Image (cartoon, grey):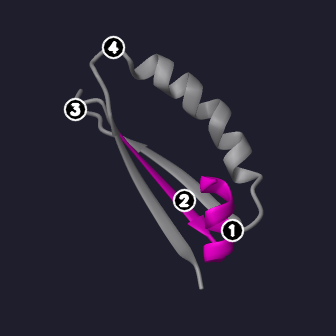
Amino acid sequence: MAITLTLEFSMKIGKQPAFLKLLNGALAATRAFDGCIKVETFAETDGTSVFLLCLLYTSDAADESTLC
């Protein structure tokens, strides 16, 4: 059974570049976790500074290991 996590991040205008830099480094490590099938990122294009992160894992166990 696959598990999907969806995270939404809102930030102040102008903070997007710093957030993307942090996110790029973290996502490489996240993709390497056991059970990680896919990581996708989405960003609003209307200037609202909202980012959506979707993670797909193979099991609850794999998911729990990334959150601890």
Q: Image point 77% across, 52% down: which residue?
A: 32
Q: What residue is shown with label 2?
A: 55
Locate residue 62: give its quadrant: bottom right
Q: Are marks 3 and 4 in contact (CB under 8 Å)?
A: no
Please tell me how crowded label 4 is: few (under 14), some (14-19), or many (20+) other residues with Cα within 10 Å. Answer: few
Specify whether 7 is left or right of 30.
left
Q: Which amino acid does the dot numbered 4 rest on?
A: Gly
Q: Which amino acid does the dot numbered 1 rest on?
A: Ala
Foreground disc of the pair 4, 1: 1
Q: Between marks 4 and 1, how big is the CA–CA gap?
A: 34 Å
Residue at far bottom of view: 1
Locate residue 59: give its quadrant: bottom right
Q: What residue is shown with label 3?
A: 46
The magenta segment is 51-68
Identify whether 31 is placed above or below 1.
Answer: above
Whether the magenta-drawn stretch holds residue 47 is answered as no
Q: Which amino acid does the dot numbered 2 rest on?
A: Leu
Q: Between marks 2 and 3, how big is the CA–CA gap?
A: 24 Å
Q: Are marks 4 and 1 in contact (CB under 8 Å)?
A: no
- N-term-proximal mark, 1 vs 2: 2
Q: What residue is shown with label 4?
A: 14
- N-term-proximal mark, 4 vs 1: 4
Whether the magenta-drawn stretch holds residue 63 is answered as yes
Q: Tag on residue 62? A: 1
Looking at the rendered image, the quarter that the N terminus falls into is bottom right
Locate residue 3: give its quadrant: bottom right
Q: Where residue 39 appears, x then y in whole percent?
A: 58, 54
Q: Where residue 56 appears, x then y in whole percent?
A: 57, 66
Q: Between marks 3 and 4, how big is the CA–CA gap?
A: 13 Å
